[in-house]
Image (cartoon, grey):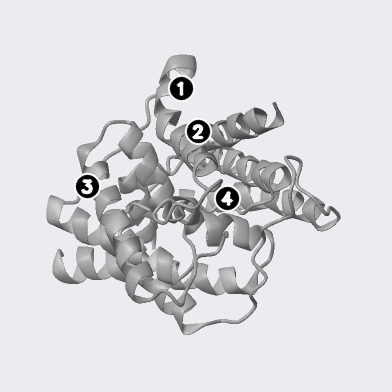
Amino acid sequence: MQIDWLSFTPIPSLLGGALLGIAAALYVLLHGRILGISGIISGLLHPKPNDVVWRLALVLGLLTSPLWAALFFGIRPVVEIHTGWYAILIAGFLVGFGVQYGSGCTSGHGICGLSRLSPRSLVATLSFMGAGFLTVFILRHLIGG
Amino acid sequence: MKKHFGLFSQFAIGVLFGFGLIISGMSNPQKVLGFLDLAGPWDPSLIFVMVGAILVGLGGFYVVKNRSEAFFGGAFHIPTRKDISKALVIGSFIFGVGWGIAGICPGPAIVALGAGYLKALAFVVAMLVGMRICERFFSGHKHLPK
């Protein structure tokens, strides 16, 4: 295994990760819920009374975060999407289907689930990480190589 | 009044989470793919993101154990299921395949959409369709935070 030292960003990643942890901890303490982005979004698909506005408020915060980062800190997020349009659509569909079927994504299972030592979330995290490693290996080294 | 504070808090936590994704580099799909590519030049940054998040998260969820009510009122909505179901494993695996194709998961998809990337819009629309179809045809599996 060869480390990509040029891309490796241990300090910003650790600090950014801590922010994610702070957000998840605040969320459960203040609002009593798991900060699982996929679950919060999917709840908007079948709107129930008193169950829509808070979801929208959170998604709006996430959606506008690049704007505030630019306005207050002069930071523009680096977003490089090299995946083609068809592949993006397939990926989006699989992610949506998978998180719904598997009850969570990187935030709900990965961050919150592991933070509360949930065995289900550990299994889910191992499953999606394993699938991610496998998929990239197949696409980049078996097919694309 | 408290209700409005609650909504603002939701919004602010959304912003904070977005900042975390931006600063950690996880809003960049290429960086995520750099982590998932074990056989290429490997970028271990995502491990540091998870460690940072979980160290803080452990404290937060530990405090919750000794409380009966959330600050903005109401009981805690924390999943209680313990069973390792097929749906959990298969669903997560399908999610991982999509994640491996594009390097995008739901949180960063919303951040990239907010940053104005059209491909993020396409991803989010496809993701909503995927969620809807799963929910429509596999409705036995309700999502976590209810």
Pointer 1 residue: A68
In the rendered structure, which amino acid carries the disc numbered 2? Phe
Marked residue nearer the N-terminal end (1 or 4): 4
Pointer 4 residue: A35
Pointer 3 residue: B122
Pointer 2 residue: B19
Mark 1 and 2 residues: CB-CB less than 8 Å, in contact?
yes
Mark 2 and 3 residues: CB-CB less than 8 Å, in contact?
no
Instruction: Kindly state the secondary structure of the residue where label 1 is placed.
Output: helix
Residue at 56%, 81% (x, y): give it.
B84
**Res. B117 mark:** none
Residue at 61%, 56% (x, y): give it.
A112
* Distance (Cα) linking label 2 and label 3: 22 Å
Camera-near label (4 vs 2) is: 4
Q: Is residue B63 left or right of residue B78?
A: right
Q: Residues within 10 Å of mark 2 (few under 14, many from 20)?
A: many
In the rendered structure, which amino acid carries the disc numbered 3? Ala
Instruction: Name which quarter of the figure residue B90 lies in.
Output: bottom left
Relative to B110, residue B8 above or below: above
